[in-house]
Amino acid sequence: MTKSSSLRAFVSLLMALPATATAEIIASEPEGFLVRHVTTVDLPPDAAYRTMTAEIHRWWNPAHSWSGDANNLRIDARAGGCWCETWTVDGQAQSVQHMQVTAARPGALFRASGGLGPLQQLAVAGSQSWTFEPSAPTSTTVTIEYAVSGWTPDGLEGWAGPVDFVIGEQVGRYTRLINTGSADSE
């Protein structure tokens, strides 16, 4: 599959999904992009971090998994740990490393490197950071940034919008899970 056809398929999938979060594309150039999302959740930082890492299966949209089942996702929240997905098809073990954990500071910072989704097949490097700041006695401001750089024949600027949309969807599901008890839209 070519980069252009991968991007078209990815954009088509995104257009079928409801928007759940406001996105900010900080930069978008042929050699890379940076997207940022900021949300506030009704948990203190330690619990917000734990929900992000230990409960990813509860908020990640299964449509953006290889197996189609978010219950197959796990984050080993330690430096060198795996943000992975494992499942079985016809008795054969399947697995994908979505990202590798590079920093794990419960209640403060989670960082992982890698190319999410179709970026995995491109010549790119990505770094995603989640920072957790107390914003009231029982709430946290969570800032998510994903920086991607590298080379593709058509440049990376066309990927910024679709990637930003998918991250925004995941951030929206994470926020809804914490603030309403359900990751799904109403």
Image (cartoon, helix red, strand yellow):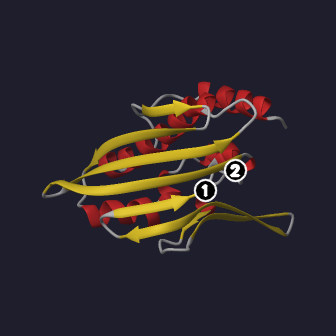
Residue 46: x, y in percent? 29, 67
Q: Quadrant of residue 70?
A: bottom right
Q: Amino acid at mark 2?
A: Gln
Query: Which residue position is annotated with label 1?
Result: 114
Q: Is residue 159 visible?
A: yes
Secondary structure state at the residue bearing disc 2: helix
Q: Quadrant of the N terminus?
A: top right
Q: Is residue 182 visible?
A: no
Residues at discs 1 and 2 in contact (Cβ within 8 Å): yes
Residue under the image location 63 percent in, 34 percent down? 156
Which circle's residue, 1 or 2, is located before the other in the chain? 1
Residue under the image location 67 percent in, 32 percent down? 155
Residue 78: x, y in percent? 48, 75
Q: Quadrant of residue 92?
A: bottom right
Residue 120: numbered disc: 2
Badge 2 density bin: few <14, some 14–19, many ≥20, Cα 10 Å:
some
Residue 67: x, y in percent? 71, 54
Q: Quadrant of residue 14?
A: top right
Secondary structure state at the residue bearing disc 1: loop
**Of 110 and 19, the residue lying toward us:** 110
Q: Is residue 14 left or right of residue 186?
A: right
> Does residue 127 sit above or below 13 in this rendering?
below
